[in-house]
Image (cartoon, rainbow, N blue to C red):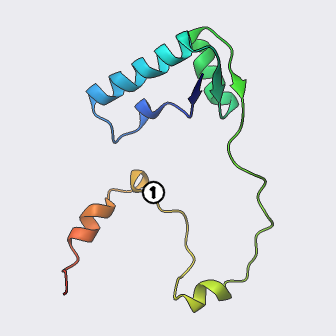
């Protein structure tokens, strides 16, 4: 049994060798596993196309609760609400930003 969470080989962070290994792992897992689980219909389509087999869809997550506009709990912690941060969507890398901050002991 193998669970496919998506085509990680399409991510910018991986080099050519890593991408090749990820593709190979996806292919071998999809081809030879007794059962393939996917987390979305799109990924199921990728498995079907590349491995010529069907997959069982089991979505990740749970139903989302209603969103609250109240930010009192964040303000108490001195946290300002913002959008989702992802280093893949910007040129900044979290470690590089950390390194530019002087260490104080």
Say above or below: 103 vs 50: below
Q: Kindly identify which residue carries mark 1.
A: 86
The outermost residue toward the top is 52
Say above or below: 29 vs 81: above
The residue shown at (74%, 79%) is 69
Residue 12 horizontal side relative to residue 29, left or right: left
Label 1 Cα neighbours within 10 Å, binned few <14 / some 14-19 / many ≥20 = few
Locate residue 44: give its quadrant.
top right
Locate residue 71: give its quadrant.
bottom right
In this rendering, does residue 50 appear at all?
no
- Between 23 and 56, the one nearer to me in the picture: 56
Residue 21 horizontal side relative to residue 80, left or right: left
The residue shown at (40%, 50%) is 88
The residue shown at (36%, 40%) is 12
Give residue 96's position: percent from left, percent from top.
Answer: 24, 63
Give residue 67's position: percent from left, percent from top.
Answer: 76, 69
Residue 44 horizontal side relative to residue 16, left or right: right
The outermost residue toward the bottom is 76
Q: Secondary structure at mark 1?
A: loop
Q: How many marks?
A: 1
In this rendering, does residue 76 appear at all?
yes
Quarter placement of the N terminus: top right
The residue shown at (55%, 73%) is 82
Residue 12 horizontal side relative to residue 68, left or right: left
Say above or below: 104 vs 93: below
Locate residue 22: give its quadrant.
top left
Say above or below: 88 vs 25: below
Give residue 95's position: percent from left, percent from top.
Answer: 28, 62
């Amino acid at each position: 049994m193998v669970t496919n969470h998506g085509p990680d080989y399409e991510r910018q962070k991986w080099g050519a060798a890593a991408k090749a290994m990820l593709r190979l792992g996806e292919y071998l897992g999809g081809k030879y596993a007794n059962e393939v689980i996917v987390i979305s219909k799109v990924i199921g389509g990728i498995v079907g196309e590349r491995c010529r087999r069907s997959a069982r869809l089991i979505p990740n997550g749970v139903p989302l609760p209603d969103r609250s506009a109240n930010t009192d709990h964040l303000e108490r912690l001195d946290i300002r609400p913002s959008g989702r941060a992802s280093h893949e969507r910007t040129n900044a890398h979290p470690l590089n930003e950390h390194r530019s901050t002087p260490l104080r002991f």
